[in-house]
Amino acid sequence: AQSVTQLDSHVSVSEGTPVLLRCNYSSSYSPSLFWYVQHPNKGLQLLLKYTSAATLVKGINGFEAEFKKSETSFHLTKPSAHMSDAAEYFCVVSAPNFGNEKLTFGTGTRLTIIP
Amino acid sequence: DTAVSQTPKYLVTQMGNDKSIKCEQNLGHDTMYWYKQDSKKFLKIMFSYNNKELIINETVPNRFSPKSPDKAHLNLHINSLELGDSAVYFCASSQKTSGRAYEQYFGPGTRLTVT
């Protein structure tokens, strides 16, 4: 079984300040982990993925995430928020499912950027 | 050159009707998915097809029937629509490889409203 918990349903930060979106996961297997972003009325776009190689993963638009096995966490960060970062962010865990991968989504974190 | 496309983008219909949503991907992927996103933004997988074969079938009412005529297309037919079917439906695709982390590419979504 696998699950993912996004610890904050809503995060607000001022433009130019750091962003931290928190995610904890649970998986019976060695998981793959993803962050997806969904802008209003749009589909989901992959920000970054963890593939059991480097624990610090860099993604698009200046985002990065660090896989910490001891803490079962995969928090998303960005040094300086931009207005265009306002969106819904989903942490996703993937684990084998009888030879196939099955994604389990977190409940999402809405990021608001204050001008 | 849209990677994953869905039609229609919006669908408004009355209870009891039957409707279909179409999905096409031009990424050459061998696996396709249908997800349902509810009003609280929660995403849940419904079905997955690999090379036209159904591989994931979550607890979904029998009124929902996916059909994959070829590996580039996955359509979703819904019979006897109910108010609770109102949601945004996302199609996605991925390529199954020997490695892990099958990142999925999402379509723009179809907003279904049942009145």
Image (spheres, coloured by chain):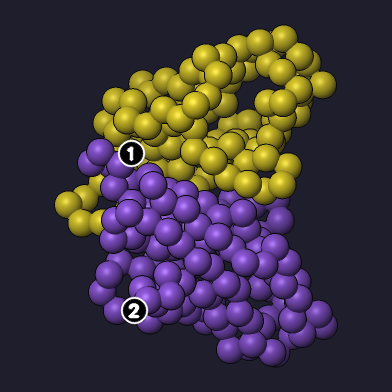
Chain colours: A purple, B yellow
- Of tags 2 and 1, the one toward the viewer is 2
At mark 1, the secondary structure is strand
Residue A14, percent across and down? 77, 85
- Residue A97's image quarter? top left
Q: Residue B66's x, y, as percent?
A: 46, 22
For mark 1, what is the residue?
Answer: B31
Subunit ID for the residue under disc 2: A
Label 2 is placed on what type of residue? Thr
State the residue in front, B51 or A17: A17
Figure check: A77 above or below A40: below
Which residue is depicted at the point 27% across and 70% down? A52
Instruction: Answer few, some or many: residues within 10 Å of disc 1's Cα (few below 14, many 20 plus, some between 14 and 19).
Output: many
Q: Mark 1 — on which chain does it sit?
A: B
**Is residue A48 shown left or right of residue B41?**
left
Question: Mark 2 = which residue?
Answer: A55
Residue A107's place in the image compared with B62, above or below, is below
Viewer-proximal residue among A8 and A35: A8
Q: Position of residue B34 (x, y in %)?
A: 49, 35
Rendering quarter of residue A16: bottom right
Instruction: Work out which quarter of the rendered image holds the C terminus of chain B and state it.
Output: top right
Q: Is residue A59 visible?
A: no
* C-alpha separation, residue under disc 2 versus residue under disc 1: 27 Å
What's under tag 1, amino acid-wise? Thr
Whether labels 2 and 1 share one chain: no
**Residue at (43, 37) in percent of width and height:** B33
Q: Is residue A49 above or below residue B13?
A: below
Query: Residue B72 appears at what percent x and percent y?
Result: 36, 34
Quarter of image, res A38: bottom right
| Badge 2 density bin: few <14, some 14–19, many ≥20, Cα 10 Å | some
Foreground: B47 or B67? Answer: B47
At horizontal 72% and vertical 9% (from top left) the residue drawn is B16
